[in-house]
Amino acid sequence: MGGDLVFYGFALLTVLSGFFVVASRNIVHAAFSLLFTLFGVAGLYAQLGADFLAVTQTIVYIGGILVLVVFAVMMTRIPRADAPRRGLDRAVPAAILALLAFALIYMVIVGTRWPQRATGAPEATVAEIGTSLMTRFVFPFEYASLVLLAALVGAAILIRERAPQDDPADADDPAGNGEVRS
Amino acid sequence: MTAGLEHYLTVSALLFGLGLYAVLTRRNAVALLMGVELILNAASLNFVAFARFVDGGVDGHIVAIFVIVLAAAEAAVALAIVLAMFRNFGTVNVDSVNRLKR
Amino acid sequence: MSEHAILLSALAVLLLPLLSYAILFFLGKKLPRQGDWLGVALLGASWLLALRIFAHFWAAGDPGLRIEANVRWLDLGVFKADAGLLVDGMSAVMLVVVTTVSLLVHLFSIGYMHGDRRYERFFAFLGFFTFSMLGIVLSNSLLFLYMFWELVGLASYLLIGFWFHKPSAAAANKKAFLTNRVGDFGFFIGILIFFTAYGTFNYFELFAAAHLHPLTGALLTLAGVGLFMGCIGKSAQVPLHIWLPDAMEGPTPVSALIHAATMVAAGVYMVARLLPLFDPGALLVVAYVGAITAFLGATIALVKTDIKKSLAYSTISQLGYMVMAMGVGVAAAGMFHLWTHAFFKALLFLGSGSVIHAVHTQEMPLMGGLRRKMPITFWTFLIATLAISGVPLFSGFYSKDAILAGALAFGMNKAHYVPFLLTLAAAGLTAFYMFRMVFLTFMGQPRDEARHHHAHESPWTMTVPLVTLAVLAVISSGWRGPTDGWFSRFVAPYDMARIVEETPGAPHAGEAFAVPAAVHGEHALPQESHGEAQESHGGTQAAHGGAHDSHDAHVRHTAHITAMVLSILVAGLGIFLAWLTYMRGRIDSSAVLARLPRVHHVLQRMYFFDEFYAATVYRFTLWFSWLCGAFDRLVIDGIVNGMGYLTRVLSWFAGLADRYVVDGLVNGVGAVIQGAGEGFRRVQTGRVQSYLAYACFSVLLLVFVFRAL
């Protein structure tokens, strides 16, 4: 079936690029792999009939968060440093843990009889999501905006330029012409 | 085989495993964050898949939207922390930042 | 004119002053002559449109005709509110009153405010005030009435405090605002009671609903008294009248605009407009408050020497008349008095402004003999004085007479003679103090030569409004009473049957509040049982019993003749006494006052209302804050300090124990901990990911263990 082919395509894209995110030594490559992973997830959303979510994923995740990540990569990369000293002492236990986690979840997936319902053709969800956000979920919705605001303020405070520590009075003198005052 | 609920859940589980591995192994704080993003995406995918095959409404979508919102907030703060860390310690290697230990 | 054209004109009447405000506020300084011509022109256009609407209703001659339009303004599911315009006879009359006085005040201000530093700002505020007032007149729902009500409060605050650099003006506008807030609080409660009960703000839907499903007993009275509290505040009724005299600190044109025709009339208009919502109990309160106000205001005006203060108390007294008219069931007469009073009181204020402009003082003992210096001002002032004193052939006579007749009929029907007697006495006092004012200001010999020498007649922009208003003060009654003259084309009692019929969307009361109309028939129709007093009918009109009719007609007729004769006699007596006292000097006013020191003191201090508030409200507030402060100091600080002291004592003991008991233990424990720490520090790597790995491992372990179980 055509739909299945698309599903397997996106699933493959997601998992493979996710693997590269994890495995790539070059952080820039990892970031770009993440792009494909996120895009693959967006495709899966579309397959699931979540049209609005797919678009949101594309715009916010890929357009916003990922760009932020890439910026961070660029600003923090030390040339030639970050020697990838990847000892097996860390990779092996981590791999075991990750595999165990996957195995556990997979067992649950396979071992459970899911109360599935018949699925019809997916419908447009935008209107319903909008209504829900404004009615049943209006409190979480407002709360999320509060969280975003707090994050914004917090981030701004965190990366603010610090005044020199030796003269606390300089803190309220952003122009730096403290010597004018006696 | 038609793609059903289990298929999506499996993809999600794979993503989760990969993310967990990244979080556990990467030394670069930014790369560690990418692992977190993978885990978040895996969770969202679960929600949407359940919304499609079990619940039928859009509640799962809304949870996924909130996940995206929180991911954005998290990314903003975390990356700010990474930048502050870089400024203060000259590195983004999470292993090197252990001043509290001393 | 079609209904559509009427509505559009009404909207334009409302919005033109707002436009004037907006332009003058932002661009006033840049316009030639600071834009005063623009304000006058826009107000003039507004005035012309108001006249057009007036003409339409004149031609229609049907007081029950109403033109209404609604726009859905808010829709929050359970809460819906419409923005609407309502034009009917009553609002047409009010439109003319407001725009006419406002236009003349604009003209007058050109001369009076000449050279003021914030000249253009003054005109902007005048426009804003006019807009708000017109909003009160034109709104068709309690919600918008309340909004514009507050806007008027704000505008009056701005205007009274226009010379805010004077501390007295700054205090006066604050006082006006706060006093009004007290009344508005009750007003708001009244509105909420009606909205809760009937789920609508629209006047006529409320009337119909209240008519069909009246609220039970006390709740209706309570709501009516609540609404009336708004009127008490805005229309300066006892006991919230204290702001009005202080508000004379504003420029005199403001006094004329706010305290003659508009803001203070808003309360009266509101009661007249909402009359079907008042039950007999509430109306009795209204009647008594109005009568007491009329009497108190008149007595205080007797002893005031400041010409504007005296006029202010005169205004309070006249407003008392109007309010009492609402209460005794002659609402139309009250509205008629509002109409005539607007013109002659504006004239009095503007005349006093003209005098103040000439002699630069407000103290009447420093004036005198200004008649020859300012003939136009003198003659117009005299006309207004005759009108307010109730001399026949002047407009005030016809309106005041109708009110007194209504009060007398009310007294005969309900055995409540107090309102009538108080207002009759007030009528005589009015004639006395007004002529005292005229004699002191214009007649006799100048008492301050220097001021008299410099006095001069005012420029034409100030005299033209005076003359116009003087003409209106004579003719505005049409030499007829409110119900047999032209006024009956505009204002008549509400015809409830027609309102119910014409208001299809009338909501039904909630079960909790309503009782069947049959049970509460008497309560529902306030005026029905005692009938409309005199020839003017106020309040809720319902089908009469025939027996009542003949009796009522008889009572009305008797009351009318009696009241007319009495009021003419009383007014003549007042004028005669004033003449004896201040012209012929037969009665020495200071000797009279010296004989009655207590009375004089009480009047001079305005019945101690300010002192009363200072002694109760202010003192209570101060006392309460002091109490809070003391509580803070003694109890809270005491607890904190006590805790601190206790802690110190305890710690001294603890220190002893520490030194001898604990230290030994601590050293031992320290040794143990150190040993353990040496072991555990290997786990504590300081690497985030190690911790994460431990956590993951533990979780997985737990899950597997529980699955296995």
Image (cartoon, helix red, strand yellow):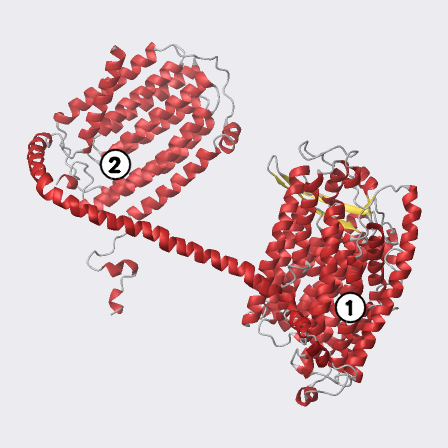
Asked whether C152 or C568 is in front, the reply is: C568
Residue C353 percent across, percent down from the top left: 69, 75
Q: Is residue A80 visible?
A: no
| Residue C540 as seen in the image, left or right of residue C668 | right
Q: Kindly indicate the quadrant of the structure image that contains residue A88.
A: top left
| Residue A140 as seen in the image, left or right of residue C132 | left
Q: Is residue C641 visible?
A: yes
Reply above or below: C677 against C376.
Answer: above
Query: Where does label 1 land, which residue?
Result: C344
Reply above or below: C35 against A51.
Answer: below
Kind of residue sitting beneath label 1: Phe
- The residue that appears at 26% across and 50% down in the rendered structure is C644
Residue C558 percent across, percent down from the top left: 91, 57
Q: Kindly indicate the quadrant of the structure image that contains residue C29.
A: bottom right
- The residue that appears at 65% across and 53% down in the rendered structure is C148
Query: Where does label 2 land, which residue?
Result: B30
Asked whether B10 or C290 is in front, the reply is: C290
Label 2 Cα crowd, 10 Å radius (few <14 / some 14-19 / many 20+): many
Reply above or below: C46 against A31.
Answer: below
Kind of residue sitting beneath label 2: Val
Residue C407 percent across, percent down from the top left: 82, 56
Label 1 Cα crowd, 10 Å radius (few <14 / some 14-19 / many 20+): many
Asked whether A178 or A121 is in front, the reply is: A178
Give the chain letter at badge 1.
Answer: C
**Mark 1 residue element:** helix
- The residue that appears at 37% across and 18% down in the rendered structure is B8
Residue A163 percent across, percent down from the top left: 25, 56
